[in-house]
Image (spheres, helix red, strand yellow):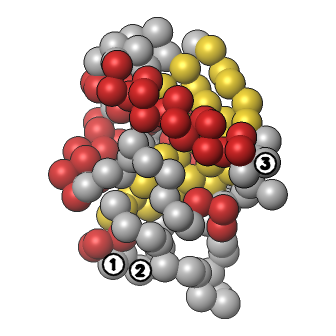
């Protein structure tokens, strides 16, 4: 069953939320998980792509946009639509970082899902609804206040 972690930030800005998403993506990758970062649209995916190149000058997080069809698929992918199922020769993607306001229908294909909440009213409302949906469906949900 998919485990869901909510990371609750004290900040109110989208910038802080996306900066934390970069740090979280690096942590997830360092733990050995293959990761998909799901965004609400192409513009956000491209913004996250740029952020992952620049957020920490001394590190490199191998990543790519699914729309760019990079082969072989890097350990961290970004996209705004459902990632394709990995082929028999590709390792599965174990984790998803959801930056969309809604829960994608296909979230349960991942072992772990991470959601980031900050103190912006629209994000709070959207993620409160996500929390309730996960709980109503019986998924284990854990909050991490930062």
- The relative height of residue 53 versus residue 122 in the rendered view (above or below) is below
Foreground mark, 2 or 3? 3
* Residue 138 visible here: yes
Do the residues bearing badges 2 and 3 touch, measured as CB atoms within 8 Å? no
Q: Position of 55 compared to 124: left or right?
A: left
Q: In the structure shown, which secondary structural element does the residue marked by tag 2 occupy? A: loop
Near mark 2 (Cα within 10 A), the count class, few <14, some 14-19 or many ≥20, is few
Q: Residue furthest top?
A: 10
* Residue 61 visible here: no
Foreground mark, 2 or 1? 1
Q: In the structure shown, which secondary structural element does the residue marked by tag 3 occupy? A: loop
Q: Which mark is residue 71?
A: 2
Which sits earlier in the primary sequence, circle 1 or circle 3?
1
Image quadrant in which the C terminus is located = top right
- Write down the residue under mark 1: 69
- The relative height of residue 123 versus residue 109 in the rendered view (above or below) is above
Q: Which mark is residue 38?
A: none
Foreground mark, 1 or 3? 3
Q: Residue at x 48, y 26 (%)?
A: 117
Q: Position of 83 compared to 64: left or right?
A: right
Name the spot of residue 81 as percent of width and height, x first.
Answer: 37, 67
Which sits earlier in the primary sequence, circle 2 or circle 3?
2
Closer to us: 87 or 52: 87
Name the spot of residue 82 as percent of width and height, x first.
Answer: 44, 70
Name the spot of residue 40 as percent of width and height, x first.
Answer: 32, 51
Q: In the structure shown, which secondary structural element does the residue marked by tag 1 occupy? A: loop
Q: Residue at x 66, y 62 (%)?
A: 108
- Write down the residue under mark 3: 138
Do the residues bearing badges 2 and 1 touch, measured as CB atoms within 8 Å? yes
Name the spot of residue 46 as percent of width and height, x first.
Answer: 23, 52
Q: Residue furthest front?
A: 136
């Amino acid at each position: 069953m998919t485990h869901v972690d909510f990371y609750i930030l004290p900040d109110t800005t989208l910038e802080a939320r996306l900066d934390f998403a970069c740090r979280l993506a690096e942590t997830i990758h360092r733990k050995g998980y293959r990761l998909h970062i799901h965004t609400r649209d192409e513009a956000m995916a491209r913004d996250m792509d740029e952020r992952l190149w620049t957020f920490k000058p001394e590190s490199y997080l191998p990543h790519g946009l699914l729309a760019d069809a990079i082969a072989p698929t890097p350990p961290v992918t970004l996209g705004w639509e459902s990632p394709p199922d990995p082929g028999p020769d590709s390792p599965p993607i174990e984790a998803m970082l959801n930056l969309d306001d809604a829960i994608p229908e296909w979230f349960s294909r991942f072992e772990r899902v991470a959601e980031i909440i900050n103190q912006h009213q629209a994000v709070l409302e959207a993620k409160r609804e996500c929390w309730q949906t996960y709980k109503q469906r019986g998924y284990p949900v854990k909050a991490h206040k930062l």
